Image (tube, rainbow, N blue to C red):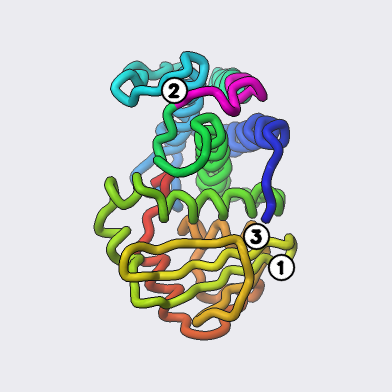
Amino acid sequence: MTELTAERARRAIVEYTRRLAESAAVAGPDAAVPTAPEWTVAELVEHVGQTQNWVAEIIERRITDPAQLPTEYALLPADPGGWPAWLSDAAQRVAEACSDDAIDAPVFNAAGDGRTGTQFWTASVLNETVVHGFDAAAAANRPADVDADIAAALISNHFAMLTSPTWAMLRPESAQALRGTGQTLQWLATDTADAWLVERSPDAATWQPLSRPADVTVTGPAATMLRILTRRLPLAGRSDIGVDGDAALVRHWLDNTAHISD
């Protein structure tokens, strides 16, 4: 399974924030976001920058009690000309907060899973930056590129979140819909060595980073699969995606998952 080093994740946060800022500048502040229709580009930029600063504060202060989470948010500059620098500063701040020293420090993990708090927040910020970068690119009618290793790591994060205790608590309808009677879904990347096996048991949906025969197997580039899983691309009509087996299981999974960035 692809696992990003902390340094790779930090550099990616900065790089993909830069790409998002470029797309936002091309689209303009009032442009609609086709893949997130409730937002304008201005609202998208504000959300990403505020999230990065908010997470940075959590790690900087080593917050362990969710009751102490920050309640104030960074202000988006009124002049769109100042947005690239504002976003760059936010990305640099959170990247520095996710330091090697912070990785194992006591920090609140909102997923309630086995990761350290800083591991969780690093993946979450990278996820927000990349996926909302897809949104900004769609608004600007630009290509939405992502490196295969980054995409693969974010697919793992996606499944980790959907099967986490927090997801079951905050999105109980989705968590219930993802349960089943033993149905299995296999996702195989064609450009990395990654595989993700999902099992829908009566108690919960679970996943493992392994490959074995399943009721349905989806194959394709990691970047394309990430965009499909996050509902930034439709599954149907993709020449680079193969679906072998019960396609209804894939449609059911996609229909009953809201992405964590939504």
Residue depicted at x 40% and y 40%: 112
Tag 3: amino acid:
Ala
Q: Give the x, y percent position of residue 248.
A: 41, 80
Q: Residue furthest top?
A: 61
Task: Give me the C-alpha separation between circle 3 and circle 2.
Answer: 29 Å
Q: Is residue 259 left or right of residue 134?
A: left
Using the image as rendered, state which of residue 179 and residue 129 is in the foreground. Answer: 179
Q: Give the x, y percent position of residue 25.
A: 58, 32
Task: Give me the C-alpha separation between circle 2 and circle 1.
Answer: 36 Å
Residue depicted at x 52% and y 34%: 116
Question: Label 3: which residue?
Answer: 222
Label 2 or label 1, whichever comes before in sequence order = 2
Q: Secondary structure at mark 2?
A: helix
Q: Is residue 108 left or right of residue 156?
A: left
Q: Is residue 43 left or right of residue 146?
A: left
Task: Give me the C-alpha separation between circle 3 and circle 1.
Answer: 7 Å
- Magenta residues, as a range? 96-107
Label 3 or label 2, whichever comes before in sequence order = 2
Q: Quadrant of the N terminus?
A: bottom right
Can residue 15 be seen?
no
Q: Residue furthest left?
A: 173
Task: Give the class, few, some or many, for how many residues have Cα within 10 Å of label 1's Cα (few <14, many ≥20).
Answer: some
Is the residue 60 above or below the residue 138 in the image? Answer: above
